[in-house]
Structure formats: C-alpha cells, structure tokens
Amino acid sequence: MRLFAALDLDDELRARLADVSSVFASLPGVRWTRPEALHLTLRFFGEWPEDRLPELTAALAQVGRPDRPFEIRLERLAFLPSEHSPRVFVAVGPTPALLAEFQQRIEQVARELGFEPERRAFLSHVTLARLRDPRQGKRLVEAVRVTPVELGACQPEHWALYQSALTPAGARYTKLAQWRLFPS
C-alpha cells in the first residue's frame, strides 16, 4: 500500500485553489490535481504492507496533537524542484510553529516504525499539478510570472492517513483513517 498523512483543507480553500488552477488549465503537458484531492502532505510513507496497516494507524492515532487551532496560509505559486526544472506546481506558504511541531511528531512515529528519515526539509505546500515534461513546464512558469492570483487560507480541523493508487489518469486517494487535529 502506498500511504501518506495529510491535512484536509476546507471546501472554500479547495474551491479557491481549483479556480487558480483553472486560470492555467489550457496549457499542455500538465496533469491537474482534482479539487477534492487537494491536501497538504505531512509525511509521505511510501509502500507499507497491508497486514501492518493497523500498526501504523494505531501509532498515528497516538501522535500528540496541537493544543489549539492554527491557520494554513498559501501565499504564492512555485515549482519543485525549481523553476528551471519544473516537475510539480504548488501553492506554498509559511509553516506555522504548531504545524512544524506536529509534522515532526509524525516524522518521529515514522522513524520508530522503521521508515527512513525524510531527507528534505518540510515545506508547507499543496500540489496543484504535475508536469509531464519540464520543457513544457516552462510555459506554465512564464504564465504564472505574469498572472496575479489570490490563494487563501484555512484553519484545518482534521488530518488523515491516505492510500494513494497510481493510475494513468493520475493518483487516486482513499482516506483510511481520520483524526481531529486539535481538541474541541
């Protein structure tokens, strides 16, 4: 099973990000993320044996949650790994301290379960699209540079464990477990 943990975005922010994506939708070579699949990844686990799913779910359920709500603010559009070699089109923003601490607790659980440490620093972002060919991505880079957009913010209430199934039409996500992000 291909798994990841993510923050669920509210419907308003998902709709806003879908509107932003639609501005650039006519450009070729781009596979857009469906609005209902937009999320903020906390930790990509990769392959995990299905018979060990209860172990992972139980460990994640015990992760210490933030003690109060926080806001996710997406402030700009960017490309990963860079504008010079664009493979992924994202909306990014600052990482609130409460989110950084929570993400580190998930990372610690992953290590305790035997996952390799994440090599890259955590980047608070939402993937809007994947580019099939970085050369075609240059057109999207140029379009983004000259198009003003407003992104948005939300106060996430839940986080979840998802299964990702890769298909020719793009990844399909199935929510396997969900938890409240902070005490009510």
Image (cartoon, grey):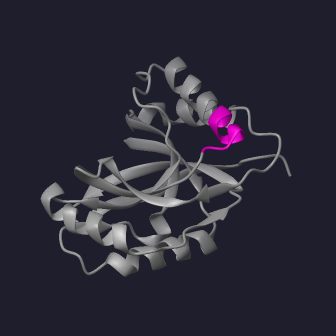
Q: Position of residue 111 (x, y in %)?
A: 50, 20
Is 58 in front, or is 39? 39
Q: Position of residue 28 (x, y in %)?
A: 18, 73
| Residue 12 painted magenta | no
Q: Residue pushed farthest front? A: 146
Picture quadrant where residue 170 is located: bottom left
Is 47 in front, or is 149? 149
User: Which region of the structure is painted magenta?
Assistant: 95-102
Q: Position of residue 78 (x, y in %)?
A: 39, 56
Residue located 35% across and 68% down the image:
144
Residue located 73% across and 32% down the image:
64
Picture quadrant where residue 60 is located: top right
Residue located 63% across and 36% down the image:
100
Residue located 47% across and 30% down the image:
52
Q: Main secondary structure of the magenta part?
A: helix
**Is 176 on the left-hand or right-hand side of 32?**
right
Picture quadrant where residue 98 is located: top right
Is 88 in front, or is 147? 147
Q: Position of residue 151 (x, y in %)?
A: 54, 68
User: Is 69 located above or below residue 113 in the figure?
Assistant: below
User: Is 89 located above or below residue 48 in the figure?
Assistant: below
